[in-house]
Image: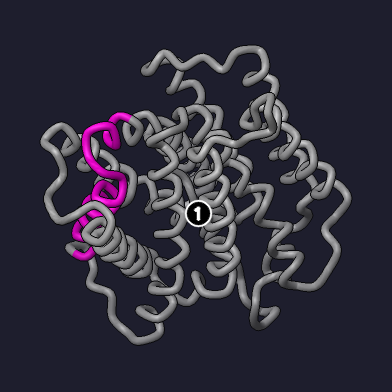
Amino acid sequence: MRRPLIAFAALAVAALLFGATFVVVKDAVAATPPMRFVGWRFLLGALVLFAIRVPRGKKLWRDGTVAGLFLFAGYALQTQGLTTTSASNSGLITGLYVVLTPLMAALLARRRPRPLVIGGALLAFAGFAVLAVVDDLALSSGDAYTIGCAVAFAGHIVFLARTAHWHQVVPFTAVQLLVTAVLGLIASAVAEGTGVPAQDAWPAIAITGVVVSAGAFYLQVWSQTVIGPSRTAIILALEPGFAAGSGALFLGERLGARGLTGALLILAGIYVVLAGTGPEDDLERAAIGSPRDQLSALPQAES
């Protein structure tokens, strides 16, 4: 009985760290270019995990590389978005990956989503419209990047539904972080020029690289192997609330009546979707591959 309790506690800590990280990244990208931050952050996290266990095997590197492509897309879009949107908006919109995942999984499995999933999705996207779409029906570039981030994280989850159970957590995670780091550094060299992060950004790189990218990410993946994806998703769905709370506490961000309404609709939609997702094997059936595949990583995102 103690092992599940430890997993729940670990996930709660991970959700808190993921939510608070939006504030850290928001400050960091004001001091250093976003892709440079992504590259160095994940390089540091990858080095920590490589020091624990070196990844070996073609299959691990192949699956880790593909998963890393999704992970890079998610974090690159999220970090770029944070240059022009608030930490609160970023956290809330990123949370839409919980809504998008069962929809994407159902699409790949060629089956109709459950009614509660559809209803929750409509509720969450109504909240997104209230939160992010202004009076002239325009969407800020930062919010647009962040909705792309949510799509990428949902794709990451669905891909992990097929592959994560074949690999040990630490080396599989290490490959994904390394791929994200390499792509981030390449993107930075092309779009931002070569160089190292500004001195003011290094504390944020250390915190997000070691504590979050390596530490909290590991806690998340390990916990999911203990308690399963559905209960994991419920705990990690607290992340957007932690992000909005951290933005208010540390950055003085205020959502206002309209923003608060949108935030509540998004959070309500997320939990309606989780309630309607069904048994633990829903995403297993949706995963590409054998129906015997067991899901061991849901969801994958954060900040």
- Work out whether residue 4 or residue 76 is closer to the camera in this orientation and state it: 76
Task: Say which quadrant the C terminus sits in.
Answer: top left
Q: Position of residue 66 (x, y in %)?
A: 44, 73
The part of the image, by quadrant, that contains residue 26 is: top left
Q: Is residue 232 left or right of residue 168?
A: right
Decide: is 288 above or below 254: below
Q: Tag count in the figure?
A: 1
Q: Position of residue 204 (x, y in %)?
A: 24, 36
- Does residue 236 appear anywhere in the picture? no
Q: Which residue is mark 1?
A: 300
Taking the spot 50% from the left edge, 27% from the top edge, the residue there is 88
Magenta stretch? 27-50
Taking the spot 32% from the left edge, 67% from the top edge, the residue there is 179
Q: Position of residue 297 (x, y in %)?
A: 53, 60
- Work out whether residue 113 or residue 276 is closer to the camera in this orientation and state it: 113
* Amino acid at dot 1: Gln
Task: State the predominant SS element of the stretch in magenta.
Answer: helix
Does the magenta-highlighted stretch encompass residue 156?
no
Taking the spot 64% from the left edge, 19% from the top edge, the residue there is 260
Badge 1: how crowded within 10 Å, few (<14), some, or many (20+)? many
Does the magenta-highlighted stretch encompass residue 43?
yes
